[in-house]
Amino acid sequence: DTAVSQTPKYLVTQMGNDKSIKCEQNLGHDTMYWYKQDSKKFLKIMFSYNNKELIINETVPNRFSPKSPDKAHLNLHINSLELGDSAVYFCASSPPKGTEAFFGQGTRLTVV
Amino acid sequence: GEDVEQSLFLSVREGDSSVINCTYTDSSSTYLYWYKQEPGAGLQLLTYIFSNMDMKQDQRLTVLLNKKDKHLSLRIADTQTGDSAIYFCAGSYQAGTALIFGKGTTLSVSS
């Protein structure tokens, strides 16, 4: 069974659309994250959720909204997509006081 | 905030050792990690080290930490073509918190 799974794996959409990326972890972890990897492969934290509570919100446009219906899921909703949003988005999870973050396989978002 | 720096490229011949270097700015980084990313794939944790350790060895991988200089290195012995990937150094203040990543080092292994 995949520990951290994201859907879809690829997403191509037009500017101005609204889209969501789903993430689920079956590890029983309390903390989940969204990271963005740009075209230069730079990885930056976007959001972190601990037991459904947002604990980090880096300087991300408010067009991005994480939604956590329960602690096994952390979805990323993006409104009014822009060309610059094209990137690979990684979901991850970690246990409390755990040393390892487990990453999903990524969602490659292309805005045209 | 934390800043993590890495050289962007490293090219080695198969069978040689590879050393990938990383420097970080925040001395309160408690956990330091090395992740590997193969083309089109996700991030795979290779190894990690606590800030109270100087060295950690795991098969072909050796991590050295110089806390005074805030320098972390990953040595891969007997580098193979399958080791070609991007290697990311990352740090976190405490377990279970978000990782701050370096820009990644692309390792190219030629036969």
Image (cartoon, coloured by chain):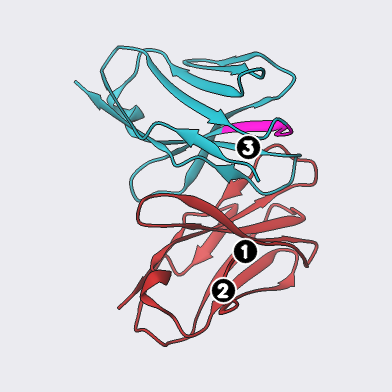
The reply to whether residue A53 is in sight is yes
Viewer-side residue, A2 vs B107: B107
Q: Amino acid at mark 1?
A: Glu
Query: How far is disc 2 from disc 1 in space, using C-alphas?
Result: 23 Å
- Are labels 1 and 3 assigned to the same chain? no
Q: Nearer the viewer, mark 2 or mark 1?
A: 2
- Residue at 57% across, 40% down: B3
- Span highlighted in magenta in the image: B28-33
Is residue B62 on the magenta stretch?
Answer: no
Residue B101: percent from left, percent from top: 54, 43
* Residue A61, numbered circle: 2
- Please tell me in which quadrant of the rendered image residue B51 appears: top right
Q: Secondary structure at mark 1?
A: strand
- Colour applied to chain A: red
Q: Secondary structure at mark 2?
A: loop
Query: How far is disc 2 from disc 3 in space, using C-alphas?
Result: 24 Å
- Residue at 57% across, 22% down: B71
Looking at the picture, does residue B94 appear above or below residue B107?
below
Q: Amino acid at mark 3?
A: Gly
Q: Secondary structure at mark 3?
A: strand
Q: Chain of mark 2?
A: A
Residue A111: percent from left, percent from top: 35, 76
Q: Nearer the viewer, mark 2 or mark 3?
A: 2
Query: How far is disc 1 from disc 3 in space, using C-alphas?
Result: 24 Å
Q: Quadrant of the C terminus of chain A?
A: bottom left
Residue pointed to by mark 3: B91
- Are labels 2 and 3 assigned to the same chain? no
Viewer-side residue, B5 vs B17: B5
- Are labels 2 and 1 assigned to the same chain? yes
* Residue A24, numbered circle: 1
Looking at the picture, does residue A59 appear above or below residue B51?
below
Residue B39: percent from left, percent from top: 33, 45
